[in-house]
Amino acid sequence: MERYHGILQDKRYKKMLQRLEEYEANREFCCHTLEHFCDVARLMYIMSLEDGNCIPKDLIYTTALLHDLGRLKEYEENIPHHIAGQQIAREFLMEYGYNNQEIKDVLMAIGEHRSVQNKTHKLSYYLYSADKLSRNCFHCSAWDRCKWSIEKKNSTLIK
Ligand SMILES: [Fe+2]
Ligand SMILES: [Fe+2]
């Protein structure tokens, strides 16, 4: 079985999802739910397939499932979630037997998912792009109040 299934069933992971849901119960803007993580995973996988299946599915799904857990620390301690998320992700990755290169790649992608620096690092680029494409900004009532730049807002359905 792919390793991301272990994370998905992990009690600590489930608890984090639940706490995120509680924090965002009244949030007007996009939330950071399991649905979002799955949307991102599938979009990343489509991108990888379109590029010749260049990244293992397990690594893609793992990255997507972990990428926004840092939101908890952002709500609780005001630490930007792309940074806090790296620490949380590292613990899961080590626990579930990812190797050093995989850990490095996933942490880089999470660290860059708000403004990707290196478009040649495909996992980072896919995460950054899928994260934005997963949001239906073109049908959002909070468009005017959302602080995302116009470049980040998804203006139409692409994938
Ligand atoms: Fe994020
Ligand atoms: Fe996200």
Image (cartoon, helix red, strand yellow):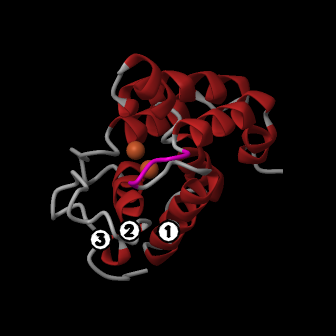
Q: Which mark is residue 133?
A: 2
Ranked by sequence position, the earlier of labels 2 and 1 is 1
Residue 136 % position (x, y):
40, 72
- The dominant secondary structure in magenta is loop
Looking at marks 3 and 1 on the same chain, the residue that comes earlier in the sequence is marked by 1
Q: Which residue is mark 3?
A: 154
Q: Nearer the viewer, residue 111 or 58?
A: 111
Residues at marks 2 and 1 touching, judged by CB atoms closer than 8 Å: yes
Q: Is residue 75 within the magenta segment?
A: no
Name the residue that disc number 1 marks.
Answer: 43
Q: What residue is rendered at 51% in x and 29% in y?
A: 72
Q: Is residue 85 left or right of residue 17?
A: left
Residue at 80 percent across and 31 percent down: it is: 11
**Where residue 18 sits: x, y (%)?**
68, 38
Q: Which residue, as the protein is rendered here, is positioned at the far top?
A: 77
Magenta part of the chain: 25-29
